[in-house]
Amino acid sequence: NAGVMQNPRHLVRRRGQEARLRCSPMKGHSHVYWYRQLPEEGLKFMVYLQKENIIDESGMPKERFSAEFPKEGPSILRIQQVVRGDSAAYFCASSPLGDHSYEQYFGPGTRLTVT
Amino acid sequence: GNSVTQMEGPVTLSEEAFLTINCTYTATGYPSLFWYVQYPGEGLQLLLKATKADDKGSNKGFEATYRKETTSFHLEKGSVQVSDSAVYFCALPNSGNTPLVFGKGTRLSVIA
């Protein structure tokens, strides 16, 4: 059973460009979480999605950031007009249930560098 | 919401030394508690968990006991190896509907 997959692993964007980060959850998992990790910091929750639904986006910046998890295909985290402060590692996790006491399985992350 | 405070690093130990990484939490009710490990350049992996008070989670020689009296979930290992060098995160679910809340992480370096 393949784990959570994320691509690309590394992404370099110039200021003002768009960044698209993809996450394919583990087989059978219908819940996806996105977290951001700034250098030397812990992970901060951004958004929690189920298929075709955003359940909780309380951690998402109000502007430039959006996320989706369509019926078919991976979850996408989209950052428009990137700025240097967006440089971070973005991790996706999935779980089989929405009960947050269950383990979340993490992908290897996408390291975004904005130049 | 729930929160977690984790011992700051970095921690440097010699091989076979005893490890303790402190973690205390503030929570509504008694949520599950987790320790995750992040090896260099990789994502997080669940190291161990405890789902109720007095439970002991263990894996790969690591242990942590869910102590509601002291609201703690300290990570311990009796004899560390170089391969244990990583960043360790304490985590718990937030109150309400928000997923995991993480500590800032403790970087462990084990030298031969």
Image (cartoon, rainbow, N blue to C red):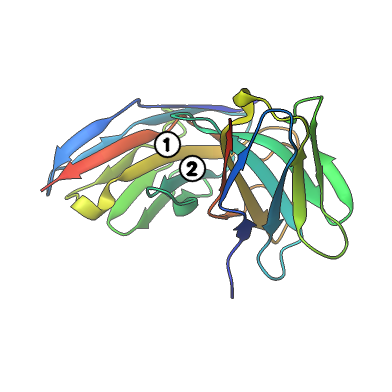
First in sequence, mark 2 or 1: give its number.
2
Which residue appears at 65% of the width and 66% of the height? A26
Q: Is residue A21 left or right of residue B61?
A: right
Percent position (x, y) of residue B44?
Answer: 49, 49
Which residue appears at 43% of the width and 44% of the height? B54
Q: Is residue B68 above or below residue A73?
A: above
Percent position (x, y) of residue A25?
Answer: 68, 61
Q: Is residue B77 left or right of residue B65?
A: left
- Alpha carbon separation for disc pair 2 and 1: 6 Å
Percent position (x, y) of residue A81?
Answer: 76, 30
Taking depth in this image into account, of A111 and B73 the one nearest to the observer is: A111
- Asked where in the image residue A28 lies, by quadrant, the reply is bottom right
Percent position (x, y) of residue B82?
Answer: 20, 51
Taking depth in this image into account, of B84 and B59 the one nearest to the observer is: B84
Taking depth in this image into account, of B106 and B5 the one nearest to the observer is: B106
Q: Residues within 10 Å of mark 2 (few under 14, many from 20)?
A: some
Instruction: Specify the subunit that label 1 lies on.
Output: B
**What amino acid type is highlighted by mark number 1?**
Arg
Residue of label 1 = B67
Which residue appears at 74% of the width and 29% of the height? A16
Instruction: Specify the subunit that label 2 lies on.
Output: B
**On the rendered image, what quadrant is the N terminus of chain B found in?**
top right
Q: Is residue B24 above or below residue A52?
A: above
Q: Are marks 2 and 1 on the same chain?
A: yes
Residue of label 2 = B53
- Asked where in the image residue A11 lies, by quadrant, the reply is top right
